[in-house]
Image (cartoon, helix red, strand yellow):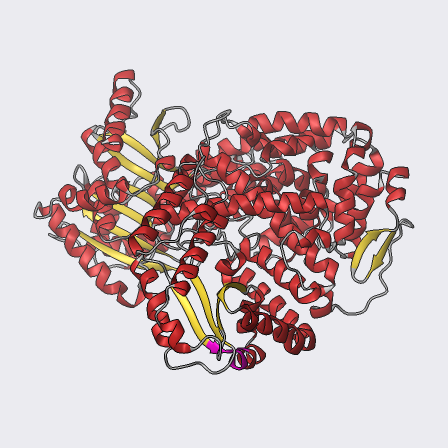
Amino acid sequence: MPETASSINPFSTIESIRELRESLISDYINGKREDFLRQHTQLLDHYFLEQFASSKVGPEIGIIQNPFAIVALGGYGRGEQCIHSDVDLLILFQKKVPRAADGLIKEVVYPLWDLGLEVGYAIRSLKECIRLAGKDFEVLTSLLDARFVCGMSQAYTELVSEIRESLIQKKSDDLIHWLFDRNEDRHLHFGDSSYLLEPNLKDGQGGLRDYHTMLWLARILSNLKEPRDLEYEGYVTHEEFQTLQRAISFIWRVRNLLHHLTRRKCDQLYFEHQTQVADLLKFKPVNGLQPVEQFLGILHGHMEFIKQQHRMFLHDLGLIRKFRPERRTSKSSKIKDLLVDKGTLNFTSSKKIIKSPELLMEIFHESARLKVPLGGEAKRLVREFSYLIDDDFRNSPRVVKAFEKVLQIQVPEFNVLDDMLSTGFLENFIPEMASISNRIQYDDYHVYPVDRHSLKTVHTVKSFNASPDILLADLYMELKKKKLLLWAALLHDIGKGDPSGGHAVRGAEMVRKILRVKGLPSKDIDTIVFLVRLHLFFVEIATRRDIQDEETALFCANEIKDAERLKMLYLLSAADSMSTGPKAWNDWTSTLLRDLFLKVLTTLEKGELATREALNTIERKRAEISEWIAAEKEANELDNLFNMMSPRYLLYTSPMEIKDHVRLYQGLENADFVWEIATEHESDTRRVTVCAKDRPGLFSKIAGVFTLNGLNILDVQVFTWRNNIALDIFKVEPPTDHIFESEKWDRAEKNLAHALSGELNLGKALDKRTSVYRSKRPAALGRPHHVIVDNETSSFFTIIDVFTYDFPGLLFLITDALFRCKLDVWVAKIGTKIDQVVDVFYVRDFDGQKVDSPEQVSEIKNTILDVLSA
């Protein structure tokens, strides 16, 4: 039987403490001890007892004349001593603090510092403690966790008595108010850990501090002694307390493993540590899910429970209403078995639910209509009576209609769907939702679990009615059947319950079955299924295809066919991206998506006229440019230059831009290149126009120079005039330091000149930076590299899609590989897929032809994969 902390004999040397502690931690990490927090706390208790008993300073102080005690505070006081948590102490003297007290600190604290433990201590008299606690609620809160360790217990007992009688009983309202405000500030600062992919285990919403706040409030109000008294005092039910303890125990386990891995106090579960924690917890791959995805799903589930329990705790105590009062209203429910009481919506009686199960839906409908949240007891009853939600309930026209009302009503103050999810109602009403509950997609792209993302997407769609984006607002307000879009928003990722891929198509099939049994009209179902099936289509086309190419708009129009569906698909695509995370939605993505939408809408509305209009556009530009040429001194030369420009260039380039490009060309003379940098304020990007004498590998060298200078390329258009002049137009993210931006561009310009002249070996310059970064990438991101060579989509170009993960130098490596395959890049789309980086290149061979022979296609794939895998 393993030795427990209570059986440890007193020890006399610091080395024996170190050995005992290391053995305890090792056994715990290897799964040989479970009750680590208690045993670790007891180990420290034994140390202080031994130090107190063998103290040389203690007798000098005179413990009889001036009783003192060593008191544990914070996590140590609560018996929650994690591996690298601080050890917080109070050396409490009943009377004045003697001068010899510093010697006691040297005896007791210094050895722990030598062990590498962070020890925080305070030496105070009883009177000083009471005075400071009365002035500073931070001090008073810390004393709520005070626990006697050793010394004279009467000093500790008197402290506890004075704190309760002199401070807590007299200042309880002020203290509770302060705790509540600090709680909200903490949530605002650290975020909702039950949602975030890198949660803060301690301070985030749903973290340990929410649990501690419940304990502190219960101690203030009910003089709580032990956590289990939460149940005995009626704050939680027996089942809730058991679930709460399981959740807290799991988070403590994760926190300790995180301390072990980082070798320090650490509460943020960073991406780089998540796979390691999952391995230590012995998760194994199951049904296509990675161990880390299973681990994070369970963790988020526990943190969500703590968050909801904390919310109900505050509601039940009336604290939210007390300190965040709403205007008095005369709101009342239309449903006789529901009532609004003290700002929350509740059932009049649990018996009414058994008699009328539809009340389980009606209470959510009324919550949305009245904009009043469910009370804590109402949430408990919804969970308790969920067994009444059977097929007859799920498919009842009355229930389905009420659910659609909930979908459509906007409630800015809270999200009714969140309450449906947290009480288990949503999974019971749509059982297929269970497969995406707390489902984590392990990448640095998706911020939220799949179920939370789905609810957030619904919320985002509804917020479009007040969006500052006029196009989004107008399109949403013009929709005749908003509920179809909202159904699609809720169910668009339902297919992700199966991790095998193709979730959009699989989800569309599931949605058809779900909505058919709920009795929706066939025409409505067809529209919702269409939106779910194509919810990735619009973003993928916008970020992976040349949206200036008329063929792209025609392809989209042929796929979508209907203008009303196009508008809904655009709104769903925008909401989905906005609700995924900052890497999915930014000014650049927004601009691409909007431009593609407008082009496809024009094509749908004008049909074949769009092609004729393109030809007319070129002719109009010819006429406008001809007038300008005639007014210039070098008219003949400019006229010849105009004839060198390709129809593709003339179609996609405005007359003003053509004039700018001509002036740039005139400045080229004998130089290898000239460039111009312009700011595009709408998308907060830089447009870099490079005019150069064309040569093989030009694009690759420019890309390498940008990478060398930390400039992130978003999009590229490459034009080659018939006089062998290359015009490469890059859209680039601006440097992070705008103050020194001009210096950055000057350095990049010199680098490019040296690269083109052969003085700078870009491969070597980038190699070190690339290899260092790639070695730091989390292993879970290393999905297999994938290359697709597409000769079907475009009539004029071969399109190469490269799926990989991002790192500095990636674009240079790929374009250099394309150059070695004797390919010219004409268009490049540098972006992301929903769950992976994808770079897209429109290419032709050096003779200007598509690359369609099997041998060439195989060579391209192998060459790119070789550089990615190196």
Q: Residue furthest left?
A: 759
Residue occupying the point 60% across, 70% down? 160
For this view, does 528 lie left or right of residue 372? left
Image coordinates of residue 111 in percent, x first then y, are 32, 62
Q: Nearer the viewer, residue 311 or 363?
A: 311
Is residue 834 shown in magenta?
A: no
Is residue 128 shown in magenta?
A: yes
**In the depicted structure, whether residue 682 falls above or below residue 523:** below
Q: Nearer the viewer, residue 459 or 284?
A: 284
Q: Quadrant of residue 242?
A: top right
Q: Nearer the viewer, residue 720 or 140?
A: 140
Can you say which quadrant of the picture contains the C terminus?
Answer: top left
Residue occupying the point 26% across, 25% down? 860
Image coordinates of residue 619 in percent, x first then y, are 40, 44
For this view, does 374 lie left or right of residue 527? right
**In the depicted structure, whether residue 86 falls above or below residue 420:** below
Q: Is residue 680 visible?
A: yes
Residue occupying the point 86% across, 41% down? 353
In this picture, which residue range is highlighted in magenta?
124-129
Q: Quadrant of residue 88?
A: bottom left
Image coordinates of residue 103 in percent, x first then y, are 34, 74
For this view, does 8 lie left or right of residue 480? left
